[in-house]
Image: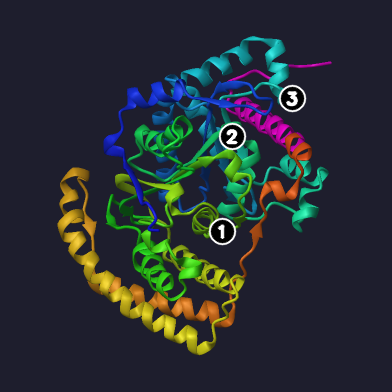
Amino acid sequence: MKSKFLVSSIKRVNLERSVDLKLNSMVTDDIGLSRPVLISLVIPTKIDAGEKTRRRELRTLSRILEECSKLADIGYVDEIIVIDASMRDGKPDYSVLTKVIRTAYLHLRLFRREVELVASSKAENLHASKGFFNFFVKVVHQFDPLISKALETKNVFKRVGLERIPFGKGAALWLSVPLCSGDIVCFIDSDIMNFRKEMIVSLCDPLIKSINSVSTSTIFTKAYYKRLTLRYESESREFVFGGRVTRLFIKPMLKILSKKYSNVFGEFDKINYPLSGENATFKNILDKLSFPYDYNVELSSLYQIIKSHGIDSITQVDLDLFYHIGQSAKGLHNMVAQLSAFLTKLLEENGISLSEEDLNSLANEYLNESKKWVERYKVIFHREIEPLRRAIKAPIHYSETTERERVELFSSIFLETVKNKKYEIKVLPPWRNVLNSTEYTLLTSLLKYRANQFTYTRLLKAGLVPKIKTK
């Protein structure tokens, strides 16, 4: 039986209708009572790049929060969690989250009212200082020592074989899961320069419709788009044809793997943008997913969803034009290495061990396939991307020669990584495998208290609430 391929688009969003549907959608809680569906928005950040990029990333994050404020005011989003991993001189840098709090205070009326209540009431101030005031916007640092202490106290580190929270985007998303109160959790990256509130609605809408309909069964939404990338540390506003790792490595490679090893990668070639960081799913699905520490988190989530529920449980959402802040060449190369190791690990887990001859053959097939994709993307660039220069009022650079050179480099990185086993894939297990239901509920409460308490400390640092003296 052929799988049903579900797609949606930001262009079809009717905001008023979507908000009305969300506000009138009900779920059943653990004791059988109906209540309105809740949406948590999670924004992972890591702002420790060069100064030019750092300033741009902070401005972009501020814009995202401004747009999110519009969804908060109309009741579409019920909670925003910003989880940051920024470091300076080897130590957690809390300044980013202080800036986030200032921006949220300026633009989110609901959050501002909460802060004003805490600032004006000694009792509420005291509650907030202990973590007992539930803020609409919560900020969390991935390496907050008190969060680590809570995880250690509840034996989480011991059970997952770690001494501390690891570095990596995947680890941040794993940590965010028990912090979320929503029935639906939407993840968006913090570097989307043209972010619009409709992006969140586009991702959550199919899930809300699934709650209300017996004919649709979407449990996971995944974004795809035309991607432009702002040059890393660029002096001026210059873009390149984005999605380089997706376009030139993972898409051609998955097309090959889906044919050669269909029992493992059978329907991956139907995914338009496997590495997009914008997606949404139900909280009870997230509780059952494992999370690689690193960039493989996006591919891993897809793999687990497809294997457990089939591709017809996924709705792919066209977000149209999407431009973001690029990373360094080294960052792209690390991503290719991580993905290479993950793909071969999936094969090994399914009983397929690749010999050196197999790997060389796969690399050659990739080179031949990717050259076809370079030709295809050359046409797409001149037909669809280049005309966007006027709309964005900035140059968009493209070089077919550079694309071909990049493919050769990606092939070399793939072979070097998998032959020499240069990268070890480390995975955090599903929360439901780490703790039983009672333990998980208790840990969730502790982490939420700490998130609220840490948010209060950033309010103090920003000078938005007074510190209450207690005897």
Q: Amino acid at mark 1?
A: Asp
Secondary-structure class at tag 3? loop
Between tags 1 and 3, which lies in front?
1
Residue behind mark 2:
139
Which label is found at residue 130?
A: 3
Residue 454 falls within the magenta-colored stretch: yes
Q: In this view of the protein, which residue sits in the foreground, 335 or 85? A: 335
Q: Amino acid at mark 2?
A: Val
Left or right side of 158 for 36 = left
Which residues are drawn in magenta? 442-471
Secondary-structure class at tag 1? loop
Residue 455 falls within the magenta-colored stretch: yes
Q: Is residue 34 above or below residue 175?
A: above
Q: Amino acid at mark 3?
A: Lys
Q: In this view of the protein, which residue sits in the foreground, 428 or 457? A: 428
Of the residues under marks 2 and 1, which one precedes in the sequence?
2
Between tags 2 and 1, which lies in front?
1
For the question of whether residue 141 can be seen, the reply is no
Residue behind mark 1:
294
Which quarter shows the C terminus? top right
